[in-house]
Amino acid sequence: MTPTLSLEDLVARTTDLPTLPVAALAVMREAESSTASAQSVAHILQQDQSLTVRVLRLANSAFYGLSRRVLDPQEAVVILGMRSVRNLAIVAGTYPWLAKPLQGYCLGPNELWSHSFGVAVGAQLVANRTENADADAAFTAGLLHNIGKVALSIWLEGKMAGLLDIAERAGLAFDEIERKMLGFDHAEVGAHLAEKWNLPTALVAPIRYHHRPSAAEPASYLVDAVHVGDYLAMSIGLGLSGEGLRYSFDGACLERLGITSDDLDELSLDFITSYNQHEKLFEEAVTA
């Protein structure tokens, strides 16, 4: 099939594209700064009332088991730590559109969210385990890796069954069928959006190559961590959709990361535990 739509045209003609709130981006960037402090992060939080409420709700959740209520954003940052506040800001900023159903990918409400959060948790575990990639960046890249699906879904509505049939007969992964049909895949669409948001190049690469980590030039531990996180989420059935039936795992990324098969088994167990501990906690913090 000859592509009839350029990537730029698709993005320009797609309504309701995902966006990241200014406050969420500001918190993420400030938390990464070498001069960041609880005071500076709290100051940014206070510019967005809804984000402040969500951070305070998390600080006062049963997960932290505090003996008294926390009412001050700066104190909440101290209690939660920069990592949790940074991650919560990104979760809060992305949840509204990650939780939407995507008919083009046969994903119901919250299914893309469950998968994306799972990849974020898995990628962070890999980064912590190997110490080759920044764990916070791995979480963010994992959460954002499938943003292209939000933009591409409307163009695939009613076509999933046919595409899967083509993929099965041709022995191709689903992203390869997307490229044959459109000239690009959801990963490339997502990378294009990430560039429009002015996200760091280090975060754009895992979005672009999360299905093809060995194609990244130069090779990136962060890309590899997100690919393994994607595999971990797929392995327990998080947001499979039709695409999951044609998922292709690139084992070369394990060698680059220095992960053995035994390590991967241990990571799988740790992943299930960590995902179960944190998914509902973060979801309730941004929706209650």
Image (cartoon, grey):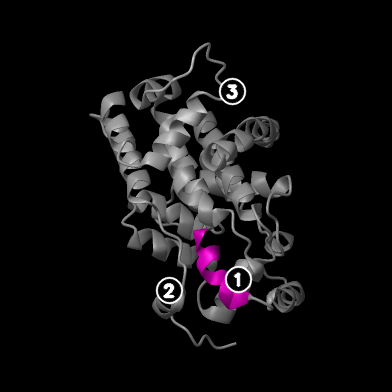
- Identify the residue under disc 3: 63
Looking at the rendered structure, the secondary structure element under dot 1 is helix
Image quadrant where residue 17 sits: bottom left
- Identify the residue under disc 2: 11
Give how far apart the Cα atoms at labels 1 and 3 are.
42 Å
Looking at the rendered structure, the secondary structure element under dot 3 is loop
Labels 1 and 2: the sequence-earlier one: 2
Disc 2: CA contacts within 10 A as few (<14), some (14-19) or many (>=20)? some
Magenta range is 147-156
- The residue under label 3 is which amino acid type? Phe
**Residue visible at 50% across and 88% down in the picture:** 4
Q: Quadrant where the C terminus lies?
A: top right
- Identify the residue under disc 1: 176
Q: Position of residue 72 (x, y in %)?
A: 37, 23
In this view, which residue lies farthest toward the left? 35
Q: Is residue 172 above or below residue 221?
A: below
Looking at the rendered structure, the secondary structure element under dot 2 is helix
Q: Nearer the viewer, mark 1 or mark 3?
A: 3
Predominant SS along the magenta part? helix
Image quadrant where residue 76 sits: top left
Q: Nearer the viewer, mark 1 or mark 2?
A: 2
